[in-house]
Amino acid sequence: MSGLNQMTLFQTWGASVPQKGSTADSEVRDVEEVVVADDDDEDDDDLMVVAVYEAEKSLQIDGNLGQHNFPGLDSSSAKVWIYPTNYPIRDYQLKISEAALFQNTLVCLPTGLGKTFIAAVVMYNFYRWYPSGKIVFMAPTKPLVAQQIEACYNVMGIPQTHMAELTGSTQAQHRQELWRSRRIFFLTPQVLVNDLSRATCPALHVKCVVIDEAHKALGNHAYCQVVRQLGSQTQQFRILALSATPGGDTNSVQQVISNLLISHIELRSEESPDIQAHSHQRSLEKVVVPLGESLAGHQALYLQVGTIDPLISDLVAQIILLVYMLLNVVRGEIKVMSGH
């Protein structure tokens, strides 16, 4: 569903995988295996190895992977992808992370089930694969942007000296220096729209874009503008979209998919078998908080006014109107006198 027909190595991997034991499988045994938490999972390792071979074959890469078709790619690093073991291994996070590396993916997970963790894994691997590339994390508000910096540092240990938070108040000269010297950027979409428009952001170096609260990508939202502007300058970037609620109706979901060039969806609900062990049961408890003396006094006055006899209410309104008219007359006379 990519309006730009985006094609990168990472979309191609796994697209056409021969069966185990085939000639292609035997020819690539010397390719380094994927580094994941479960070293026992030989099937997954073999699948990735074969996928690398098929990608190289279909794209006719002749030993110069990073130079001709994928500028900036470190072909040695790209032979593996890394998944962290400093957190408990959750199968659904591992599977979603792998899918998001190789396809533009919309991840729909209930709140609290690790969307940021998945984003950190994807960002870190593109950080490795493209030593001079730029990785962008966008969130719709500044507080959400600030939260993600610490989260990504804690999950994958990306040096904070390689990260930058950009806001609209950052001076232009300083912004240019940050885009030149830093690798990973946390910002709101409007900030990125402005930097792309002014050519402050080096669009050709952007290799991965993470979009939080992706359901907002409707119409001409800043998220949509970012994707359009990037797509007009390069097709070598990955998109990872995150949302707990992808849309209120089918049309909205389709707009998000089209606007963000999504080619793959990872959807889980609280009833999904692979997340039930990690989902949290919610219990609701009603707590009635007393108003206190001050608020109770205001409440009593409000109720008292509301119960005044309608005739008295009309009389009070007429008196207020009469006083207002008299004040205007007095003001007019004062103006006339001052004119003399």
Image: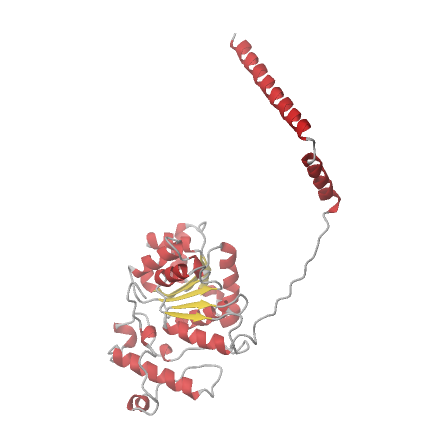
Percent x, y for residue 14?
Answer: 34, 79
Percent x, y for residue 162?
Answer: 45, 65
Q: Is residue 259 visible?
A: yes
Nearest the viewer among 7 and 127 is: 7
User: Which quadrant of the figure contains the N terminus?
Assistant: bottom left
In the rendered view, tell whether residue 104 sits above or below residue 28: above
Q: Residue at x 54, y 11 (%)?
A: 338
Q: Is residue 63 visible?
A: no
Nearest the viewer among 244 and 117 is: 244
Model colouring: secondary structure
- The image quadrant of residue 122 is bottom left
Percent x, y for residue 225?
Answer: 35, 55
Percent x, y for residue 155?
Answer: 51, 71
- The image quadrant of residue 303 is top right
**Residue 137 horizontal side relative to residue 318, left or right:** left
**Residue 23 horizontal side relative to residue 121, left or right:** left
Q: Total label count?
A: 0
In the rendered view, tell whether residue 50 sits above or below residue 203: below
In the rendered view, tell whether residue 62 sits above or below residue 107: below
Q: Residue at x 37, y 59 (%)?
A: 255
Q: Residue furthest right?
A: 293
- The image quadrant of residue 133 is bottom left
Nearest the viewer among 237 and 154 is: 237
